[in-house]
Image (cartoon, rainbow, N blue to C red):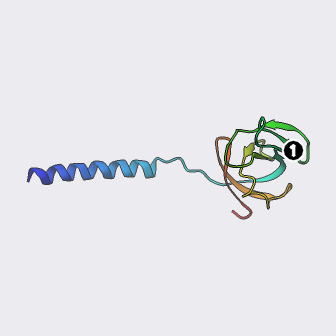
């Protein structure tokens, strides 16, 4: 009987932790924005400075070793780093829905 009580208490604690992780997670919703500029770096090996396609403005991009350096500027004032290969088919002027965490673009889509 003592083992059963111990297992039940442990099970309730695990359920409480799981419920806390599920319900207290900060929800991230999509924002509707317009792409104002895209930034690309000519060389991955050097200092990660990206140049804007439209404005020719130069910005620093967080370094990565696996993927090319890229950033996308939006009309909400955010300039987010992104994977160049994944987001090539989005053009300047497109209305898109984005999710981001910090300065990193996590998801982008045309329809919300």
Number of dots carrying numbers: 1
Tag 1 secondary structure: strand
Camera-side residue of 47 and 111: 47
In the image, what residue occupies the spot 85% across and 37% down? 58
Return the residue found at the far right. Answer: 55
Report which quarter residue 65 is drawn in: top right
Residue 16 in picture, x, y percent from top left: 33, 49
Return the residue found at the far front. Answer: 45
Residue 74 in picture, x, y percent from top left: 79, 47
In the picture, measured across the screen, residue 19 lies left or right of residue 51, that is: left
Residue on which the image places disc 1: 52
In the image, what residue occupies the spot 75% across and 45% down? 69
Residue 79 in picture, x, y percent from top left: 76, 42
Camera-side residue of 16 and 106: 106
What is the crowding at mark 1: few (fewer than 14 residues within 10 Å), some, or many (at least 20)? some
Return the residue found at the far bottom. Answer: 111
Q: Is residue 43 above or below residue 96?
A: above
Camera-side residue of 53 and 46: 46
Residue 90 in picture, x, y percent from top left: 80, 59
In the picture, measured across the screen, residue 53 lies left or right of residue 11, that is: right
The quadrant in which the N terminus is found is bottom left
In the image, what residue occupies the spot 69% across and 62% down? 112
Q: Is residue 82 above or below residue 57?
A: below
In the picture, measured across the screen, residue 63 lies left or right of residue 73, that is: left
């Amino acid at each position: 009987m003592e083992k059963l009580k111990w297992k039940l208490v442990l099970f309730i604690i695990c359920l409480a932790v799981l419920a806390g992780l599920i319900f207290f997670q900060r929800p991230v919703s999509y924002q509707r924005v317009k792409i104002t500029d895209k930034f690309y770096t000519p060389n991955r090996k050097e200092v990660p400075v990206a140049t804007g396609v439209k404005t020719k403005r130069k910005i620093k991009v967080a370094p990565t070793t696996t993927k090319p350096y890229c950033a996308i500027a939006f009309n909400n004032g955010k300039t987010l780093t992104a994977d160049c290969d994944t987001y090539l088919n989005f053009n300047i002027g497109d209305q898109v829905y984005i999710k981001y965490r910090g300065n990193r673009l996590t998801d982008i889509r045309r329809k919300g």
